[in-house]
Amino acid sequence: MEIIRQMQERKDLTERERNIRDYLMEHPEAVISMTAKQLGEVSYSSTAAVSRFCRKIGCQDYGEFRLRFLSELQSTEGGQETTTEHFVIQLSLIHISEPTRP
């Protein structure tokens, strides 16, 4: 199932997970540069809630979710010149620049 459609159709999301989904649907472009912690903050949830949301949607972690979500956005926005490879490169660079856990 497509990740965006699954996000819209899931009925078993908690209030925090719905906050995350709603933020993502209203600001899809923000995902490319946002960490799980930042997404948790702007959606009034937490990093743990973001991780649970990603697993519930069928991804192993936030990194996989980001790749799949952005790939779907790119494929649904036919006129956009940005390629999936471009997203992967950007996400790889973002991942490299993110601080590791202590």
Image (tube, rainbow, N blue to C red):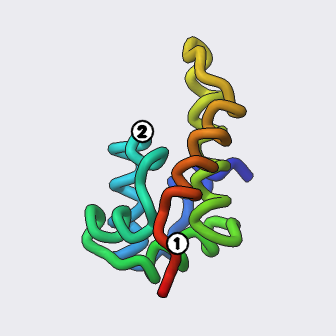
Give the residue type at disc 2.
Answer: Glu
First in sequence: mark 1 or mark 2?
2
In the foreground, 61 or 7? 61
Q: Do we see residue 94 in this rendering?
A: yes
Residue depicted at 70% across the width and 71% down the height? 60
**30 up-or-down from 75: above or below:** below
Q: Left or right: 24 with respect to 81?
A: left
Q: Do we see residue 5 in this rendering?
A: no
**62 up-or-down from 45: above or below:** above
**10 up-or-down from 1: above or below:** below
Residue 53 - label: 1
Spot occupied by residue 17 in the image (x, y as percentages of width and height): 42, 72
Q: Residues within 10 Å of mark 2 (few under 14, many from 20)?
A: few
Write down the residue under mark 2.
Answer: 29
Q: Left or right: 34 with respect to 5?
A: left
In the foreground, 88 or 39? 88
Q: Residues within 10 Å of mark 1 (few under 14, many from 20)?
A: many
Spot occupied by residue 36 in the image (x, y as percentages of width and height): 45, 67
Residue 100 - label: none
Q: CA distance from mark 1 to mark 2?
A: 18 Å
Q: Nearer the viewer, mark 1 or mark 2?
A: 2
Give the residue type at disc 1.
Answer: Phe
Residue depicted at 61% across the width and 37% down the height? 87
Quarter-wise, where is residue 88 in the image? Answer: top right
